[in-house]
Image (spheres, rainbow, N blue to C red):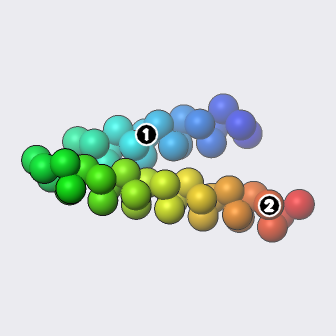
Amino acid sequence: MKKQMIYIMLLGITLLSLNACGTIAGMGKDLQRAGQVVEGKAQQQQQRY
């Protein structure tokens, strides 16, 4: 399960990087969104247990 979660996070970050805007600000927004997704998934896992 842990490996799957890491794989999903890396895939998401990669996809966001490929779609990132050409500016530092755009990339920062994409990274922030990726962090929010990871945080949401972590909270879901905590609620399961």
Residue 11: give its label.
Answer: 1
Tell me which amino acid carries mark 2: Gln
Q: Residue furthest top?
A: 3
Q: Which quadrant of the figure has residue 17? A: top left
| Residue 24 screen position, x and y as percent | 19, 48
Instruction: Report the label total.
Output: 2
Q: Which quadrant of the figure has residue 41? A: bottom right
Name the residue: 66% across, 32% down.
3
Residue 19: tell me if it is visible: no
Q: Which residue is mark 2?
A: 46
Q: Secondary structure at mark 1?
A: helix
**Above or below for 47 versus 3:** below
Quadrant assignment for the C terminus: bottom right
In front of the other: 46 or 31: 31
In front of the other: 26 or 2: 26
Tell me which amino acid carries mark 1: Leu
Q: Secondary structure at mark 2?
A: helix
Comparing labels 1 and 2, the label whose residue is closer to the camera: 2
**Distance in Å between CA atoms under marks 1 and 2:** 22 Å
| Residue 10 screen position, x and y as percent | 47, 37
Quadrant assignment for the N terminus: top right
Q: Residues within 10 Å of mark 1 (few under 14, many from 20)?
A: few
